[in-house]
Image (cartoon, rainbow, N blue to C red):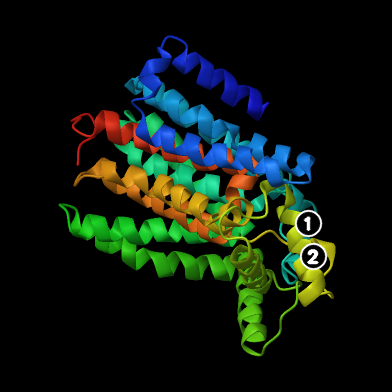
Amino acid sequence: ALSISMFLFGINAIRDVPPREWLRQKWWLLGLAWVAIFAISGLWSEDKGQWNDHLQTKLPFLLLPLAFSYQPRFSGGQLRFFTISVAVMLLISAGYTISIFLSDPVYYINEYKVSHMLPTLPKKDHIRSSMAAALFVIWCVYAWPQMTGRKMKLVVGSCMALLVVYIHVLAAKTGLVSFYLFLAAWGVYLSFGKQKLLGIAVIVAMPVVLFIAMRSLPTLRERFVYIGYTIFMYRHNERTDNLGDVARLVSYQLSGKLIAAHPVTGVGAGDMKHEMDAMYERYYPQTDEHGRLLPHNQFLVVALGCGIPAMILFIVWVFWPLTKVRRNRQSFFFFIVWFILFIQLMIEPVLEVQFGVFVYLFFLLLMLQELGERAESKIISE
């Protein structure tokens, strides 16, 4: 359903745009280039099935940036309808997770002691689910001035509050870090503007909210206990795949060795998993299949599959949208969304998963469109 929706949205947006106009989109051309290298790496990939899977996941990069560039801007009514619609979908997803927790809270609290997260939609992807919720809360804060009328503000505000509670109950590090990073940045931004008292209140409220959440939500409390345990074990030279963050560091180490051995072409997008498995077998044979990871860093994944030149091109693509940033409200919200997504690229192979590609592109392009089309708009006031 997601694939079909992205395809239809993209085709509908560009159907009347002559292909020669596409060439004016430099950022899209950069994306086309690094995805093309993924495609070409099939020539030196033995596992064509894995290569095809990695390539298919990247196809939205060929369509969605163009689609967001050429689709009409939201009217005020459309923006409000969009916000409510997305809120309903995210709340349904959050309700699914909360209902499972309430069915046996003791069991799931104990599961958090060993870093087993609550089931989420879709496909138990708690990382992207929590990130989508946090990014949508940011969108609601951005669009708040256009939520006209008390009823609309009450509905949107209630949705935001429920999603914030969900982020804390789920206690995924990605969502929590994204939410609090935004609060800190927003508080500083307001403090240097016309709403200094509100900015200070936001900054002061952060530790208070976190303290209350820690006292009230056992899943969040157990999550922090486990993170402390992981740090303690790492400092005492424990290197097991049973510790999630340590497993990430091991994946960086092993992928670095492979990249050094294949710096120009990489190992091929189709052979990344096979090559990483061989490295685990050589250096960490005690690690089971579940703990044998692709490098949990998207930049390293690109270098591993396609070589350092492809990684450099990918880096340029990631940073290119920052050339649109100016000194205005829209730019602040765009930058904080970009930065949160950038952190995600640094700690997860987010663009190797369909839902990860969608969340990354959807929120980045949504805010980029606002930046481009509303940069001089007076509709959203300071």
Q: Position of residue 129 (x, y in %)?
A: 61, 47
* Residue 229 percent across, percent down from the top left: 66, 81
Say which of 377 and 143 sits in front: 377
Q: Is residue 180 left or right of residue 126?
A: left
Residue pointed to by mark 1: 274
Pick the front one: 30 or 105: 30
Which image quarter is the C terminus in? top left
Image quarter hosting the N terminus? top right
Q: Are marks 1 and 2 in contact (CB under 8 Å)?
A: yes
Which residue is at the front of the view, 99 or 133? 133
Instruction: Please tell me whether residue 15 is drawn above or below residue 364 in the rendered image.
Output: above
Q: Categorize mark 1 by other alpha carbons within 10 Å: few (<14), some (14-19), many (20+).
A: some
| Label 2 element class | helix
Q: Residue at x 74, y 51 (%)?
A: 271
Q: Residue at image x 61%, y 81%?
A: 231
| Position in image of residue 309 (x %, y %) | 49, 52
Q: Amino acid at mark 1?
A: His
The outermost residue toward the top is: 16
- Relative height, residue 292 to residue 64 (above, below): below
Q: CA distance from mark 1 to mark 2?
A: 6 Å
Q: Residue 239 sits in which quadrant?
A: bottom right
Picture coordinates of residue 136, whole percent (x, y): 47, 42
Image position of 154 (left or right of 92):
left
Q: Is residue 121 something that shows in the picture?
A: no
Other residues around mark 2 within 10 Å, as few (<14) / some (14–19) / many (≥20) = some
Residue position for label 2: 278
Question: Which amino acid, by three-letter code, is at mark 2?
Answer: Ala
Q: Which residue occupies 31% across, 55% down?
A: 186
Horizontally, residue 210 falls left or right of residue 381, namely right
